[in-house]
Image (spheres, helix red, strand yellow):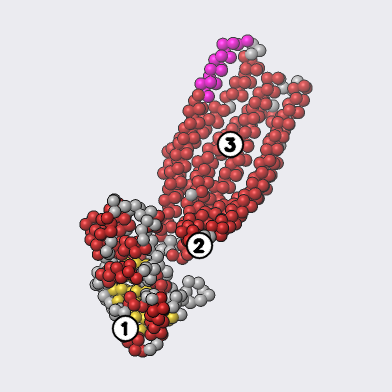
Amino acid sequence: MLKRFLSYYKPHKKMMTLDMLAALMISVIGMVYPVVTNKMLNEYIPNKMYTTIVIAGAIVLALYFARMALNYFVQYYGHVIGVHMQSQMRKDLFAHLEKLPFTFFDNNETGKIMTRLTSDLFEVVELAHHGPENVLISSIMIVLSFGYLITIDWILTLIIFTCVPILIVVTIKLRKAMKSAFNDRRKSTAIINAAVESSVTGIRVTKAYTNYETEIKKFEKGDKEFVDSSYRAYNAMAKFHSSTTFITEVFNVFILIAGGLFLYSGRISFGDYSTFIVSVNLFIHPVNTLIGFMEQFQNGVSGFKRFCEIMDEEPETDKPDAKTLENVKGEIEFKNVNYSYDTSKGVLHDVNLKIEKGRKVALVGPSGGGKTTLCHLLPNFYKLEEKDGAILIDGTDIRDITLDSLRQNIGIVQQDVFLFAGTIRDNILYGRPDATQEEIEEAAKRANIHEYIETLENGYDTEIGERGVKLSGGQKQRLSIARVFLKDPAILILDEATSALDNTTEVLIQHALDELCKGRTTLVVAHRLSTIRNADEIAVVIDGKIRERGTHDELIEANGTYKKLYSLQFRENDLVE
């Protein structure tokens, strides 16, 4: 993991080297003051060397100006390096997320993923920036100050240094408890983010059902977990800091007693004693800095581990010899397909279905029967194992086709339309980012949405809000259809594309869908059976198996499950009327 972390320093080696050199100079300049103090007390002042006193003071002042400039360089450019490292990590993480399969997002909440991209990486970069500087400056200061203290009085120095092993033992012991507590706190932060993301996304449902109290209780549950984990984390941190601070303060007690005795016995002079008091703080301060670094190190390592957890997730990949799907005719075949989302229960069982080029096949049946799963398997959103059959397009197994070329040739219109925050143009362009304005407008016309767009003040530059909240359901659906028109795929999947619409809007959308289906092989998942009467073939899917197949008229005449579903639906419609 260390090698992986250090790889993010590579683009900034020159600036990092300068940063470390500046940190080194800061440490060296820090040793000037006690040296000058010793000379002042032992030589310059007793010998009344007034000119030398002024010159020495001026030199120290000049060095402190230089140190100020070096501190500015370290603080500014060190943080700049950190920002660039954070940016690169975030880019890598986001790019990796885009390549992960559906199964990852099925099992991980959005809010928790967002935490990995934001607060976790902030902790990592704080370590990346401050860690090397703190370690370098503090280590050098400890070595230099320890060496200088020995020149003053080696016995007094060794007496003080006996506290260091005790400090190390206490630090290691308490650090383990702090590590565990902060890991729990980080997890609870992710839970809060997930709760907020879920609640804000579903705010309209909350308001519609006046379930404010329910959402508040859900949030408070996550918040309580955060508070409890924070108590544990800060309790561990308080024990850590109070214990280590106590030990470092014992340094001063030893100096006071031992130094006083040495001064009384005449072993050291008053000037040496005074210098020792000044110098020992140069030893204690970096020790405290290293102790504080332990907390920063723990937070950073914890964040980087969580970063690596996602980066180590297996992305979607093409087979080494995968082919590019070209000149697509659109013939589809499901051969002995079996599938389950987990090992407990299968969703599809030995499904066989062949769809000729340009034909329209509808899948109907009760919810949970496996219709949508078939639609998800066709673009290879979920992977079929070799033992679970095969799905072919133009006779080629989709596992042998590159994912990009496969999905570029499949258009999907779903019941739950997802639109991105941005303009109408941005969302239509998602179908083909390099399309011209004329092509965008043509796609919108074919989707029966162009005239509405023209009535808007900003036309195609109209902002639609998050997930298209400023548009009606029918308008969002027509935008998604325009997007597919622009993509112009050979194969089309309509997954209950009109089931959430009113009858009037459904008729308008259906005209656009009929236009969209022309010349394309189409797989339709239908809830309203009236919309698929003209399908070339209808397959009834129940409990993961195709129970009946045929045209609408053939299935009605067969007097089986389809007829029962059809009759029941129209009887319900009559009751509604």
Sooner in the amino-acid sequence: mark 1 or mark 2: 2
- Nearer-the-camera pick, 202 or 211: 211
Label 3 sits on a secondary structure element that is helix
Rendering coords of residue 317 (x, y %)? 39, 63
- Amino acid on which disc 1 is placed: Thr
Rendering coords of residue 41 (x, y %)? 65, 17
Reading the image, the residue beneath label 3 is 139
Q: Residue at x 72, y 22 (%)?
A: 268
Q: Is residue 198 visible?
A: no
Q: In the drawing, does residue 570 fall left or right of residue 485?
A: right
Rendering coords of residue 199 (x, y %)? 50, 57
The disc placed on residue 22 is none
Label 2 sits on a secondary structure element that is loop
Q: Residues within 10 Å of mark 1 (few under 14, many from 20)?
A: some
Q: In the drawing, does residue 303 fall left or right of residue 464?
A: right
Rendering coords of residue 13 (x, y %)? 44, 41
